[in-house]
Image (cartoon, rainbow, N blue to C red):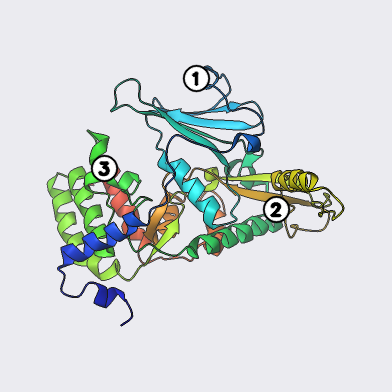
Amino acid sequence: MPVTWSNLFDGKTAAEKAYSVIERARAKATLVSIPYHVPELTLPVPLPSLAQIENCADVLKMLSRGCKVVRINQHYVVKFGENVDAIEGQNMLYVARHTRIPIPRVYAIYQDIRRNPRDVKTYIVMQNIHGTTLRTAWPTMAEAEKEFVAEKLKGYFKQLRKIPSEGYYGSLGPSYLRDSLFWHQGDSRQIRNYAGPFATEALLMEGMLNSYQKFRTDAMGGRRLEFYRRRMHEIFRKHKPVFSHGDLCLRNIMIQKFPAVSLPITGMDDNLSASAKLKQRFLNLRMPRKPSIAPEEGSEAFVVTIIDWEKAGWWPSYWEYALAWSDFRWKNDWEKYFERVIEPNIIVSPWIYWLRREASTPISLS
């Protein structure tokens, strides 16, 4: 008799079925062990020391007291701090194994736990991506260039959607989902009580509402919560878990411009020695791929890279669009092109928008 989801769980309670899904996923988990680093031969230059990282003056971002991003020479970017999550490096390694999406290469992940074990300092050493963010470039881009970028992104997300589902909603591991919808004031570790992992979409929805309940303790919030519990089950259903970036916006997309007439990557000469072939193959991998099409004749083409994978994981199929829809500022035409990248879901998106908005902003009574 073939094994299916229905007969696999025959005779089990709903709780036992949910537990089985998570345990099966945990048994198949392929996270790398930390500390992690790539073979020394594949490094462009030696990895930076802790002192070089801590004392680096080239600060790209200071996201919080516990999260800092610095650039070490032309090769490395390091994201580090107490609030840096090693899952970001794990996600990037996972995407690199399963797709050909351009992302920063992860060279090392390690942690400093010499101080308080509850305040682990995580370091993610990754490739420095030369270029600019799409948020900076978008206002001056021509329509043909925007269409080119949208088409590239569409192809990337087709690759993500082809990664076979592991049957649960959550981060790799499986672990809890990373999103501010599940966070509330107080001990940030309490996110784990509400953020999964979840075996079903119904349990995910309950996790959202349980977290919302912690945000909204006022009477109006209670009445809204009752309404959400009555109605959301009608809408939040039949959405399969798909691997998603979880924060796709203009600031997390980078472009590198290359002349459309740039030389292609060289082929392999059969007369080369084995060691010479290995070196040439390695150099070819290090070279930026020439885009398959240019926006227009004689113009510049782009290599489009997606960064910041901390919130990636197995989200319901609507999540990528709903989250971006919640973040649209309507100051440009990005949303028009985004709908070419991700299939729109205008039914669920307003619900996610209001849940997130109400959980972070007091509701006006006027």
The residue positioned 44% from the left and 34% from the top of the image is: 35
Location of residue 21 by image quarter: bottom left
CA separation, marks 3 and 1? 29 Å
Which residue bears the numbered disc 1?
A: 54
Q: Earlier in the sequence, mark 1 or mark 2?
A: 1
Identity, as a three-letter code, of the amino acid under mark 3: Ile
- Hey, what amino acid is under mark 2? Ala
Q: Is residue 335 left or right of residue 73?
A: left
Frontmost of labels 3 and 1 is: 1
**Where is residue 315 drawn, in percent x and y?**
38, 58
> In this figure, which residue is indicated by the disc labeled 3?
191
10 Å neighbourhood of mark 2: few (<14), some, or many (≥20)? few
Q: Which residue shows up at 41% across the image and 38% down it?
A: 86
Outermost residue, bottom side: 1
On screen, residue 267 versus residue 220, left or right, reads right
Looking at the image, is mark 3 or mark 1 earlier in the sequence?
A: 1
Q: Residue flagged by tag 1: what amino acid is it?
A: Glu
Residue tagged 2: 142
Image quadrant in which you'd find residue 200: bottom left
Residue 305 in view of the camera: yes
Q: Nearer the viewer, residue 194 or 276?
A: 276
Give the residue at the far front of this rendering: 274
Q: Residues within 10 Å of mark 1 (few under 14, many from 20)?
A: few
**Residues at marks 3 and 1 touching, judged by CB atoms closer than 8 Å:** no
Mark 3 lies on a secondary structure that is helix
- The kind of secondary structure element at disc 1 is helix
**Residue 113, relative to residue 354: is it above or below?**
above
Q: Position of residue 5 (x, y in %)?
A: 29, 73
Evaluate if marks 3 and 2 touch, with contact meaning CB atoms under 8 Å apart. no
Q: Eyeballing the image, is 253 above or below 44?
A: below
Q: Nearer the viewer, residue 167 or 32?
A: 32
